[in-house]
Image (cartoon, grey):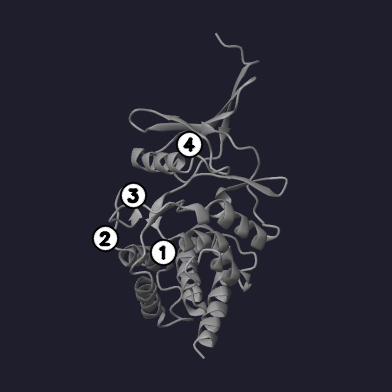
Amino acid sequence: MISDHYFKVFNLPGGTMSSCFLVSVKGCCDIVFKSNKRNILRDEVNFLKLYSDFDIVPNFLFNSPDFSMIAYEFIKGEVKNSIINKSNMLKFLVDNLICKYVEIDTNGWGRLSTPSVTWKEYLQTLKEESHILLNGFLHFKFPNIDEFIDKIINEIAIFNENKKPHLLHGDLGFYNVIFCDDVISGIIDPMPIYGLPIYDLVFAFLSTIDGLEELYILKIMDYLDFNSSFTTEYKIKEILFGLYFRMGRCIKHHPHDINIYISAFEFWKKQLDLSDC
């Protein structure tokens, strides 16, 4: 029998579908054990292994043979509901994660287990998910929003038609970012997708209601623009699509914030109109 003086187990808050617990062994690293659907954990293992050299990615330890459970080193810190110096935190994520994403030799886009044929097809899937969740909620304020988002998706796809997919975190909201003394110490709970790095940056930017109408995000996007091809118009379109997708999640998980996202959508739509002048 192992004395609990040396061995302690704690429940941890899990994701939407996962369950997690922490095993703390005296004199050893703390270990997180996570259970979830096998295809989800298999994808997470792919991400953790590929980016094992990144300081803010948890150190992967092992998985069960059937991928019903995985284990990785615990990252000390906490998730913050409000982000201080959000622009600096986004730049940190770009420098330490997003800019380092690896291009993948695959013909698929989107979810690893059920990939789409093109990036456009995957974005259309996300659009349809949000359309169902919003259930006409935005039509009074934006009567042509479906056609508007379809046009944006098409233009994003054309802009990136020669790009190759990278393996992204896929759920890089600040709710999956760990802070220690107001410094990012790690990221957790990837839902990996094959996609373009700018997707994760926009996702992170929109994941909290802080500073959604601040133009600094356009400058941070430039750090991902290795060929200096991003136009202001293109960057705003990425934000507008991200906002539409985010509003679908918002109406489902925290509807009290929806008016803030609607205001942000109006702001960036006006910025798009100005960029066309």
The vertical placement of 26 against 102, above or below, is above
Say few, some or many: other residues with alpha carbon within 10 Å of mark 3 (under 14 / 14 to 19 / 20 or more). some
Give residue 112's mark.
Answer: 3
Which amino acid type is marked by label 1? Leu
4 and 2 marks in contact (CB < 8 Å): no
Q: Earlier in the sequence, mark 1 or mark 2?
A: 2
Which of these two is toward me, 220 or 203? 220
Judge depth for marks 1 and 2 and give the one in front: 2
Judge depth for marks 4 and 2 and give the one in front: 2
Q: Earlier in the sequence, mark 1 or mark 3?
A: 3
- The residue to which callout 1 is attached is 133
Which amino acid type is marked by label 4? Ser
Say few, some or many: other residues with alpha carbon within 10 Å of mark 4 (under 14 / 14 to 19 / 20 or more). some
Q: Earlier in the sequence, mark 2 or mark 3?
A: 3
Q: Earlier in the sequence, mark 4 or mark 3?
A: 4
Which amino acid type is marked by label 3? Leu
CA distance separating discs 2 and 3: 12 Å
CA distance separating discs 1 and 3: 23 Å
Judge depth for marks 1 and 3 and give the one in front: 3
At 57% from the left and 63% from the top, the residue drawn is: 205
Say few, some or many: other residues with alpha carbon within 10 Å of mark 2 (under 14 / 14 to 19 / 20 or more). few
Where residue 178 appears, x then y in whole percent?
Answer: 61, 45
Give residue 19's mark.
Answer: 4
CA distance separating discs 4 and 2: 32 Å
At 52% from the left and 35% from the top, the residue drawn is: 59
Where residue 8 appears, x then y in whole percent?
Answer: 60, 22
The vertical placement of 147 against 210, above or below, is below
